[in-house]
Amino acid sequence: MSGGGAPHGGPGGGSGTPAHETASPSLHGQFAISPSHPALPGHFPDAAVVPAVVILEEVLALARGWLGPVGVRGLPQAKFTAPLPPGARADALLRLDGGRLKFRVELAGRTLAQGQFLLAPPDPDPP
């Protein structure tokens, strides 16, 4: 993981609070990726941006802090519409819809990424 992503009170520096405005269980969390993250060097060196896979890792870290050790069966939908600069604090909105975790990542009210993970129960015997 990078440097943020754990729910409120977690070790990563991110925050998350359950949202109760909707019928589906949801969470609003935040994360920021340090400019020294190992995935950044060489990733658009003149104008660094956080790679999509790092954003997805942060979304899953928030989800696991909220839901516990869930597994992932797939990522049927993911759309990245704007870059996330290193050091910027992003808002992550997660909503549980059956076996799907729907997410949206925003920066200053602008959607940067959205999609959904297919969740699976945790593996009782990890390798």
Image (tube, rainbow, N blue to C red):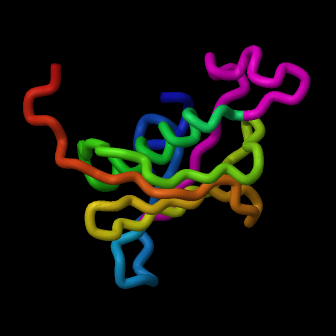
Q: Where is residue 122 in the image (x, y as percent from the top left)?
A: 18, 41
In which image quadrant can residue 86 be found?
A: top right
Q: Where is residue 54 in the image (x, y as percent from the top left)?
A: 57, 34
Magenta stretch secondary structure, dominant: loop
Magenta includes 86?
no
Does 115 sit left or right of 89 as displayed?
left
Which image quadrant: the C terminus? top left
Magenta includes 41?
yes
The stretch in magenta equals: 27-49
Q: Which residue lies at the image location 80% right of the left edge and 28% below the top edge?
A: 48
Does 15 sit left or right of 98 as displayed?
right
Foreground of the two, 31 or 46: 46
Give the total number of marks visible in the rendering. Answer: 0
Q: Which residue lies at the image location 75% right of the left edge and 63% below the top edge?
A: 110
Does 112 sit left or right of 67 as displayed?
right
Residue 20 vertical position relative to residue 41 in the rendered view, above or below:
below
Q: Which residue lies at the image location 45% right of the left edge and 62% below the top edge?
A: 102
